[in-house]
């Protein structure tokens, strides 16, 4: 099992790298600002949201800068929504390849999640710029963040596997997921403080894996604290469980793809 | 099971079923209409059987090392499906295929091209799609460019190429390896006359180099020229296996049809 995986990694890492660079090159082809958009885009969307929402929701937390609060949630959620959306269409979109050449099909959702992952790392630059400019300060706790990022990657990969497999059989998924992701945006405390949620509804929010990942990041970035053990555990479990479930669903269905696409 | 080193490909009772009906997918609208139309509902039940299409039915054969096998048959007879099953692109509905050796499937060339990328970038991308390691592409890069005669256009996006140029590039990338099993699906006629001659010569040198070849073509003269063994497939069923005389039988069948 392990040797099989390491063989696959060795054999297909070059293909994976080629697919990711292809996406990157194509994305910024013929745009004047090119890769700068990866930095500018989140800053601009955040500015719009900050403008709209900072007056709408009164921040009940003292000493918390709304910009940092918003931005830290936004980079996490944007990664998830963009990566899962691209992963969903990756199998259907690459059908001309799947039907003609032998290659592992799981490589498509993985390459999309990694491609958006590189973009995600770039959006950390404006996040840190804001942390710096608002005087929030950086402590050693920031070294804990990679754990949250890895959990986020695993969770997104899992969802990406599930969506890409399901959307082959059910094209309606593209529309359904569009609605789901909108709902998900508001169900995750990105622009508002979770304290405004009535106690009895709070459990719904806590079922959301992204809630825990965002909480982990904010504990570190805003409060300079080590997240409590339950936050660590929830993040890890969500990532692992979704990744495994996604892999199993994908593996079970992948041989049938060619009949449906 | 006996292990025979001389057998390169073992196709064992392979059947491939396509479901023509699901091509359209299930639509709520159609389901709703059918609900109120008993005639349609009956039809649907009947169609279920009709929609099944066996592209291959119980195909079995063995290929020995160094053999050059020609596949002939009408359009839609199942030749390309068979090659795709052997290449591992499709998993057969029934039966299984064992291959002992690395395969170079020249089934649809240039499938991995991204039209927005330049020829240089596409050489790497397509090479990766074909499963070549980076070192191989690095070392053969000049050979590819030389063979395709596209050096001046190396940094031009492929979408600005003519279809002949794309085919030349694809052919040049596909043929840099020395595979043990070569699968060729009617691609000898690529590019202009000069390039056709060149690509045919290259193909012949690969075939003569002792490679096992599976060759699909509608040109019976070609098949007669290069193949040791001919397999005639019609409606997904192997009609005849044998020497070059199978070509004549096939020709007779076409004339009598």
Image (cartoon, grey):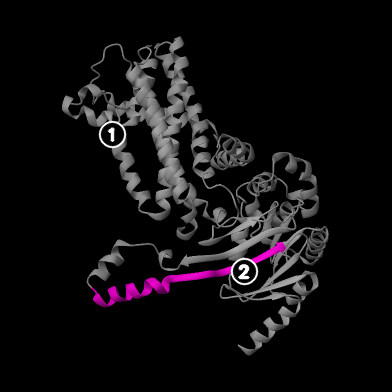
Label 2 to label 1: alpha-carbon separation: 53 Å
**Residue A108 rendering spot, x and y as whole percentages:** 52, 44
* Secondary structure of residue under mark 2: helix
Magenta segment range? B37-63
- Say which chain tag 1 marks: A
- Eye-nearest disc, 2 or 1: 2
Between residue A5 and residue A260, name the one nearer to us: A5
**Residue A203 rendering spot, x and y as whole percentages:** 22, 28
Answer yes or no: is residue A82 visible: no
Query: Disc 2 marks which residue?
Result: B79
Residue furthest out toward the bottom:
B256
**Residue B3 rendering spot, x and y as whole percentages:** 69, 54
Locate residue B71 relative to residue B17 in the image: left or right. right
Q: Which mark is residue A186?
A: 1
Is disc 2 surrounded by few (<14), some (14 to 19) or many (20+) residues within 10 Å?
many
**Residue B183 rendering spot, x and y as whole percentages:** 69, 60
Q: Quadrant of the N terminus of chain B?
A: bottom right
Which image quarter: residue A182? top left
Residue B148 shown in magenta: no
Locate residue B81 relative to residue A61 in the image: left or right. right
* Secondary structure of residue under mark 1: helix
Residue B44 shown in magenta: yes
- Say which chain tag 2 marks: B
Residue furthest out toward the front:
B1
């Amino acid at each position: 099992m392990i040797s099989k995986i390491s063989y696959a990694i060795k054999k297909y890492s070059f293909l994976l790298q080629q697919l990711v660079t292809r996406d990157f090159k194509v994305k910024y082809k013929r745009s004047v600002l090119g890769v700068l958009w990866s930095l500018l885009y989140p800053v601009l969307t955040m500015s719009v949201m900050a403008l709209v929402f900072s007056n709408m929701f009164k921040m009940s937390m003292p000493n918390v800068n709304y910009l940092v609060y918003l931005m830290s949630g936004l980079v996490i959620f944007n990664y998830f929504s963009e990566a899962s959306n691209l992963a969903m269409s990756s199998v259907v979109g690459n059908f001309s390849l799947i039907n003609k050449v032998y290659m592992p099909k799981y490589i498509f959702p993985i390459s999309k999640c990694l491609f958006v992952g590189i973009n995600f790392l770039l959006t950390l630059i404006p996040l840190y710029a804001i942390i710096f400019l608002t005087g929030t300060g950086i402590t050693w706790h920031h070294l804990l963040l990679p754990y949250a990022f890895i959990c986020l990657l695993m969770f997104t990969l899992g969802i990406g596997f599930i969506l890409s497999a399901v959307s082959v059989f059910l094209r309606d998924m593209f529309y359904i997921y569009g609605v789901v992701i909108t709902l998900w945006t508001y169900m995750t405390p990105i622009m508002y403080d979770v304290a405004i949620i009535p106690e009895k509804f709070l459990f719904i929010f806590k079922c959301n894996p992204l809630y825990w990942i965002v909480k982990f990041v904010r504990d570190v970035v805003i409060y300079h604290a080590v997240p409590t053990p339950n936050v660590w555990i929830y993040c890890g479990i969500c990532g692992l469980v979704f990744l495994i479930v996604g892999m199993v669903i994908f593996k079970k269905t992948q041989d049938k793809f060619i009949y449906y696409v | 099971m006996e292990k025979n080193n001389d057998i390169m490909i073992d196709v064992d009772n392979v059947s491939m079923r396509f479901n023509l009906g699901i091509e359209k997918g299930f639509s709520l609208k159609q389901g709703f209409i059918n609900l109120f139309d008993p005639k349609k509902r009956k039809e649907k039940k009947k169609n279920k059987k009709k929609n099944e299409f066996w592209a291959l039915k119980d195909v079995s054969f063995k290929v020995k090392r160094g053999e050059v096998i020609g596949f002939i048959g009408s359009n839609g007879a199942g030749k390309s499906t068979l090659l795709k099953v052997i290449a591992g692109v499709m998993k057969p509905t029934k039966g299984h295929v064992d291959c002992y050796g690395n395969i170079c499937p020249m089934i649809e060339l240039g499938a991995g091209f991204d039209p927005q990328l330049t020829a240089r970038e596409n050489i790497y991308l397509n090479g990766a799609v074909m499963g070549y390691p980076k070192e191989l592409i690095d070392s053969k890069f000049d050979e590819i460019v030389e063979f395709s005669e596209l050096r001046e256009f190396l940094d031009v996006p492929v979408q600005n190429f003519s279809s002949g140029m794309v085919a030349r590039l694809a052919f040049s990338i596909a043929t840099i390896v020395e595979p043990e099993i070569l699968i060729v699906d009617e691609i000898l006629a690529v590019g202009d006359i000069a390039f056709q001659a060149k690509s045919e010569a290259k193909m012949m040198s690969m075939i003569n180099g002792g490679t096992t070849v599976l060759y699909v073509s509608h040109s019976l003269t070609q098949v007669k020229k290069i193949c040791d063994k001919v397999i005639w497939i019609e409606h997904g069923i192997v009609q005849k296996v044998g020497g070059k005389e199978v070509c004549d039988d096939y020709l007779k069948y076409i004339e009598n049809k």
